[in-house]
Image: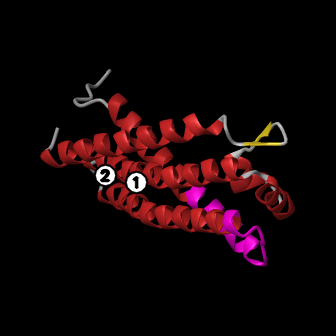
Amino acid sequence: MTRNFNRWNRLFLFALGLFIAGAFSMKWMESDLVYYNEKISVFGLELFYPKEKIVEIFSGINDKVKTILNYHLSFDFIFMAGCYPGIACLCMMAAEKIGTKNTKRVLFIFAFLQVFGWAFDMIENYYLLKWLKQPIIGNEFRIYHVVVYSKWGSALSGALIALSTLVATLFKRKNPKSVI
């Protein structure tokens, strides 16, 4: 292993720790996110609920649930600090394992895209926190969904290409021998 790979690996492990801490904290709070005896889906808030449903939920939840949702969204910032740098580290670790320059460039681009994914995730949380405080959603709901889909696109594509490249390098033969 190269020195750069080891550095990216150590940074990845640190990011993984933040990722796990944030995910654990948010999962712990999830059972308390209830609206009329039904759990509030954070994925629903991000991806599936229409704006009328979000306004209905944010207007109808009690102060305890609002506080917990506020904490949940706040812990999401810790989660983000592990998720996006972690994906970028995976891309850079994969780039260290690959010999071709073009593939390294592609992996670097996907690593760099995580900066945008992180920014989009922060913007998403800003909208949700704003609407939680004042449940009035205007025309920004379309922008919100573009931000959310862009966040998911950059994170999933970066993780997928990095992990598939790392797995492919595990199966690559170091000294291919002729079978003839």
Q: Nearer the viewer, residue 97 or 59?
A: 59
Q: Quadrant of residue 168?
A: top left
Decide whether residue 134 is among the magenta residues.
yes
Residue at the image position 61 percent from the left and 47 percent from the top: 68
Q: Quadrant of the N terminus?
A: top left
The residue segment tinted magenta is 132-153
Q: Is residue 128 left or right of residue 52?
A: left
Bin the neighbour count of mark 1 within 10 Å (Cα to Cα): few under 14, some 14-19, many 20 and up: some
Residue 81, numbered label: 1
Give the image's coloring scheme.
Answer: secondary structure
> Which x, y percent locates residue 26?
55, 42
Is 142 above or below relative to 8? below
Number of labelled discs? 2
Counting from the top left corner in percent of width and height, residue 86 is at 38, 48
Q: Which mark is residue 118?
A: none
State yes or no: discs 1 and 2 in contact (Cβ < 8 Å). no
Q: Dot 2: what SS? A: helix
The x, y position of residue 115, in whole percent, is 42, 65
Residue 92 bears which disc, if any?
Answer: 2
Task: Residue type at mark 2: give it.
Answer: Met
